[in-house]
Amino acid sequence: ASFVDERTLVGVLTFDAALHFYNLASDADGDDMPAMAVVPDIEDPFVPSPSCLVPFRSKRRNIDRLLAGLVALFQNTTCGEAAVGSALKAATLALEPNGGKVLCVFGSPPS
């Protein structure tokens, strides 16, 4: 993706009744998914690590691996809650140092 600015940072945050951040900075072995950090406190969300945002160009493989595995990761979930407000707050906190954009996609009504 040569059209992507070298300064572009990317992070992925998933959510249900808790927030799930992914360590995209560490290169996993083989097809392993990046490590997940769960933030269960949706009343006072926080960003667990600065490694949640990574340079797109140099960590593209990790980002692609995570996105390809998300469906399988959550396909058997029984949690019907969607803490979208807390997820948006946490995403905003992650962007505070540099600014940026948040793209939010969810498949159930917020709770």
Image: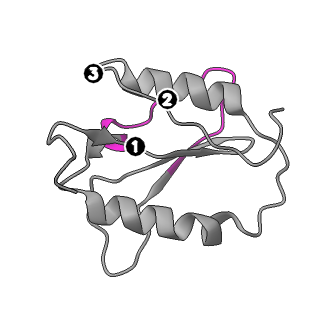
Rendered image quadrant of residue 78: bottom right
| Mark linked to residue 44 | none
Q: Residue furthest front?
A: 3
Alpha carbons under labels 3 and 1: distance apart:
13 Å
* Structural crowding at the residue carrying mark 2, measured as other residues with C-alpha within 10 Å and reported as few (<14), some (14–19) or many (≥20): many
Horizontal relation, residue 99 to residue 59: left or right: right
Give the residue pinned by disc 2: 91
Alpha carbons under labels 1 and 2: distance apart:
9 Å
Q: Residue at x 85, y 49 (%)?
A: 80
Query: Is residue 15 positioned above or below 59 on the image?
Result: above
Q: Residue at x 82, y 42 (%)?
A: 81
Q: Residue at x 76, y 39 (%)?
A: 82
Alpha carbons under labels 3 and 2: distance apart:
12 Å
Q: Are marks 1 and 2 in contact (CB under 8 Å)?
A: yes
Where residue 19 sits in the image (x, y, percent)? Answer: 61, 40
What type is the residue that disc 2 sits on?
A: Ala
Q: Which residues are magenta?
A: 37-52
Locate the C terminus and report the quarter of the image it occupies: top right
Query: Is residue 108 positioned above or below 97 on the image?
Result: below
- How many numbered marks, from 0 up? 3
Question: What element does badge 3 sit on?
Answer: loop
Locate the N terminus and report the quarter of the image it occupies: bottom left
Give the residue pinned by disc 1: 11
Q: Is residue 14 magenta?
A: no
Give the residue pinned by disc 3: 98
